[in-house]
Image (tube, helix red, strand yellow):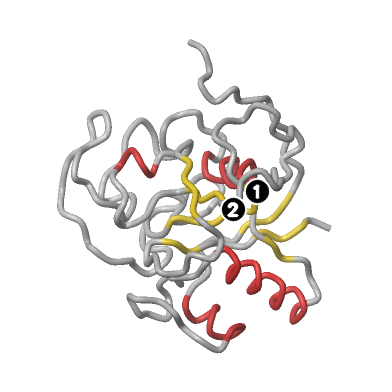
Amino acid sequence: MPDPLNTPEVTVPSFYLGRYPVTQAQWKAIMRTNPSNSKGANRPVERVSWNDATEFCQKLSQKSGKLYRLPSEAEWEYACRAGTITPFHCGETITLDLANYYPSRGYASGPKGHSLKTTTDVGRFPPNAFGLHDMHGNVTEWCQDTLHKNYEGAPTDGSAWEDNYYYERMRRGGSWLSNSDGCRSATRSWLKPYDSENNTIGFRVALVAS
């Protein structure tokens, strides 16, 4: 079958990724505010723009003496899949026992259901094989890359793909408001980097391996 996204083979160097999306408590400890709509110390922070997320990474780096940043799309998908090639790291479909999403229709043999209509505490659902939680659903997560509608010409070293042709920044993972298809490991979306009014978007941090 032809690859509609012209996906190259990518080698991803070692890196660390947050086990959970950044929580409201973590955000408040660094930024002294809490912009989230659905409040809860252990819920993921939301209503943060890409600009906000990168500022958090910069301040966290200054405070810790370590280099934190947003993951690249390649890093994010590698971490989400955790060695799998199925639509979800948990297999061919997804259920409400495995992630927080909006099951208006099932994926493959997956069931329909009722949305929780809000974020949930991080770590409530089972992790993938890498020990990472909430890679599907809860909040969509910012990546470092600028918008590219396919992978033709993408870096093959796992680094972020940034240029000045498009302004928008990439998001991955789906949210509590996404249908099951929108939570797949391969699903991509994008938004302007200053948009902070969306209560479905959060992020997790990457740490450069020493």
Q: Name the residue under label 1.
A: 72
Q: What residue type is labelled 1?
A: Ser
Number of numbered discs? 2
Residue 149 or residue 118, whichever sits in front: 149
Q: Position of residue 167 (x, y in %)?
A: 60, 52
**Left or right placement of residue 41 versus residue 130 in this view:** left
- For marks 1 and 2, give the CA distance: 5 Å
The residue at 23%/30% (across/down) is 109
Q: Position of residue 119 (x, y in %)?
A: 33, 66
**Left or right placement of residue 2 versus residue 120 in this view:** right
Could you tell me which secondary element the residue under label 1 belongs to?
loop
Q: For residue 158, what is the image quadrant?
A: top right
Q: Which of marks 1 and 2 is nearer the N terminus?
A: 1
Could you tell me which secondary element the residue under label 2 belongs to?
strand
Residue most extreme to the bottom: 32
Q: Mark 2 points at which residue?
A: 143
Q: Are marks 1 and 2 in contact (CB under 8 Å)?
A: yes
Q: Where is residue 53 in the image (x, y as percent from the top left)?
A: 59, 68
Residue 152 or residue 85, whichever sits in front: 152
Q: Which amino acid does label 2 sit on?
A: Cys
The residue at 41%/32% (across/down) is 87
